Image (spheres, helix red, strand yellow):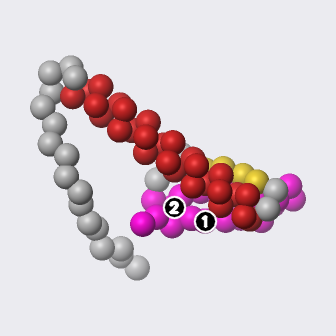
Amino acid sequence: MYTAVYKKVRSGYVAWVEEIPGVNTQGETKLETKENLRDALQEFIAARRILIRREAGRGGRLTRERISVPVLA
């Protein structure tokens, strides 16, 4: 799970994912911004997976597993 941060600006909203630098977006309404942020996060994750698979194809042996991290307050 990730944390979405929204900021009201003159033209609508800007938003970003607190835990992942570079995943950000904007929109005219908060709902539109939320949808855009979900899309941006999905695209970011898909791109990272492609890059990792390419790296594995260069002779590196990779092991993938899910990890759970407790959130610190």
Considering the image in quadrants, where does the C terminus appear? bottom left
The residue tagged 1 is 5
Query: Image point 65% across, 61% down: which residue?
Result: 34
The residue positioned 15% from the left and 21% from the top of the image is 59
Mark 1 residue crowding within 10 angstroms, few (<14) / some (14–19) / many (20+): few
Q: Is residue 28 above or below residue 6?
A: above
* Residue carrying label 2: 18
Magenta stretch: includes residue 8 = yes
The 10 Å Cα crowd at callout 2, few under 14, some 14 to 19, many 20 or more, is few
Majority secondary structure of magenta residues:
strand
User: Magenta segment, which residues?
Assistant: 1-19
Q: Picture coordinates of residue 31 (x, y %)?
A: 72, 64
Amino acid type, label 2: Glu
Residue 9, given in percent of the width and then of the height, sits at: 81, 60
Q: Which residue sits at x=43%, y=40%?
A: 46
The answer to the question of whether label 2 and label 1 lie on touching residues, with beta carbons closer than 8 A, is: yes
| Vertical order, 48 against 42 (above or below) | above
Q: Position of residue 49 (x, y in %)?
A: 35, 38
Amino acid type, residue under disc 1 in the picture? Val
Please give the label number shown on residue 22. Answer: none
User: What is the count of numbered marks?
Assistant: 2
Tell me where residue 48 sits by quadrant.
top left
